[in-house]
Amino acid sequence: MKKIVVLTGAGMSAQSGISTFRDSGGLWENYPVQEVASIEGWYRNPEIMLTFYNERRAGLKETRPNKGHLILASLEKHFDIRIVTQNIDDLHERAGSTQILHLHGELTKARSSDDPGLIIEIGYDPIKWGDKAPDGTQLRPHVVWFGESVPEMTRAVEWTRQAEIMVVVGTSLAVYPAAGLIDFTRENVPLFLIDPKPAPVRRTNLHIIAEKAVEGLEQLEKILIAKYL
């Protein structure tokens, strides 16, 4: 089975109704981005951060995977699909994909404020101020904020180096280090870039599908099956 690595961004989940912050003038659901997506925001006002992510978690419970998520899951019948996602939702999991790496954390998990490796499953439940991790520190969302390192990046690079086909869906390739992943693909590995406004990428064997995630993945599915099966 051909190894396909798929990097997904906010545009992947937008068609499920999950809003993105980069198109909203610096606001994310009416919250200033730096207040709810940076480690400085956590130190400044952790209770606002908890409220914000509790709202996102409650909304996620009512959200469903879209056809694009389902296509990626169904392609596992024919290909070794590995998904590296910048999204913190669980829609890839709920669609049925089995190999998923969350670069920026997971909304349905919480962790210690001191130990990034002390992670617990919370599902869609809220985190309250005063809720403690097993080490006695305040529980916080298991989300990688601006100003923090991306611990899963090393494994993402390993996956990307092994890819025989690379697919990028719904990301502007503006957030680093995730945006730099495509630089680790081997020479001449086909790169499929799916986005209504694809980022300017210079490389050989580049295939642009200027569509939203669902429509672009519908096209990609046909291409992959026709060309590689």
Image (spheres, rainbow, N blue to C red):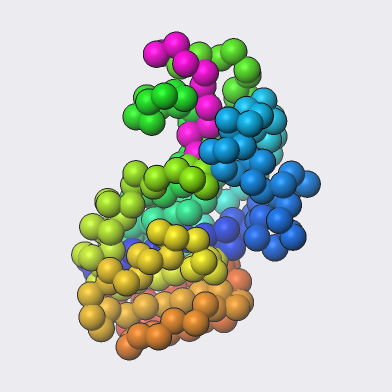
x then y, percent, for residue 164: 25, 72
Q: Is residue 215 visible?
A: no
Q: In this view, does 40 lie above or below 124?
A: below
Q: In percent of the image, x 35 and y 65: which residue is there?
A: 181
x then y, percent, for residue 85: 44, 54
State which quarter of the image contains the C terminus.
Answer: bottom left
**Residue sitting nearer the eye, 84 or 224:** 84
Q: In percent of the image, x 44 and y 81: which residue is there?
A: 201
Give the residue at the far bottom of this rendering. Answer: 204
**Residue sitting nearer the eye, 212 or 27:** 27
First to last magenta residue range: 134-143
**Quadrant of the image occupied by residue 195:** bottom right
In this picture, residue 187 sits left or right of residue 12: left
> Is residue 123 one of those drawn in magenta?
no
x then y, percent, for residue 6: 39, 63
Q: Is residue 210 visible?
A: yes
Q: In percent of the image, x 57 and y 51: which residue is there?
A: 65
x then y, percent, for residue 61: 63, 36
In this picture, residue 42 sits left or right of residue 148: right
In this picture, residue 134 sits left or right of residue 52: left
**Residue sitting nearer the eye, 65 or 158:** 158
